[in-house]
Image: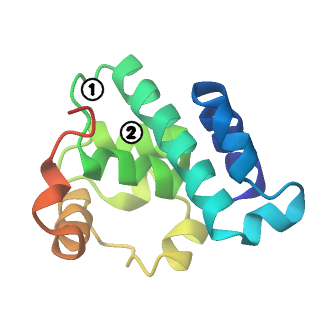
């Protein structure tokens, strides 16, 4: 996670459950602590689900949340709303495309299929239930 997303996620998780504060490692070292990272990631995914719902996605899936997690609030929400035939490059910067080994001609549908093959049956399941 990028530092800003890590901090936002950590704050969200701690606001939702203050008792988690006793489990985290403070400061920069927290970004290298698996427990603290998991808490921050869960908070960031809470933010993702709220943002996706606010954008009109009434029942966000694991794939929707994954796009938000991987590519940030703007691109992640756009990918969740995109048609399968749209190119990922319409939403994701060339730097992010390279960092994630996404070819320039990959479609949103191909990206979803690729992630689904890794995640399995959970890919299209709701994150809210």
Q: Secondary structure at mark 2?
A: helix
Residue at left offset 62%, top offset 62% = 35
Residue of label 1 = 57
**Of circles 2 and 1, which is in front?**
1
| Residue beneath disc 2 | 78
Q: Quadrant of residue 19?
A: top right
Q: Residue at (47%, 35%) from the top-left corner?
A: 46
Relative image position of residue 14 (x, y in whole percent): 67, 34
CA neighbours of label 1 inside 10 A, class few (<14), some (14 to 19), many (20+): some
Quadrant in the picture for the C terminus: top left
Picture coordinates of residue 12 (x, y %)?
Answer: 63, 32
* SS at badge 1: loop
Could one spot residue 116 in this view of the protein?
yes
| Colour scheme | rainbow
Q: CA distance from mark 2 to mark 1?
A: 11 Å
Q: Residue at x 15, y 46 (%)?
A: 125
Q: Quadrant of the N terminus?
A: bottom right
> How many tags in the picture?
2
Seen from the viewer's position, the closer of residues 35 and 68 is 35
In the image, residue 84 above or below residue 10: below
User: How far across and how far down the image is residue 74, in percent?
Assistant: 52, 38
Which residue does the image show at 80% across and 58% down from the upper left?
Answer: 25
């Amino acid at each position: 996670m990028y530092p800003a997303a890590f901090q936002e996620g950590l704050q969200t998780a701690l606001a939702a459950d203050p008792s988690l504060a006793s489990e985290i490692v403070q400061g920069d070292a927290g970004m290298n602590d698996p427990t603290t990272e998991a808490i921050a990631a869960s908070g960031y995914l809470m933010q993702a689900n709220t943002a996706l719902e606010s954008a009109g996605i009434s029942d966000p899936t694991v794939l929707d949340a994954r796009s938000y997690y991987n590519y940030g609030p703007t691109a992640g929400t756009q990918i969740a709303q995109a048609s399968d035939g749209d190119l990922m490059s319409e939403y994701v910067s060339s730097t992010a495309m390279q960092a994630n080994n996404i070819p320039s001609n990959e479609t949103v549908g191909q990206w979803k299929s690729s992630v689904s093959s890794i995640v399995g049956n959970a890919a299209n399941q709701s994150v809210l239930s």
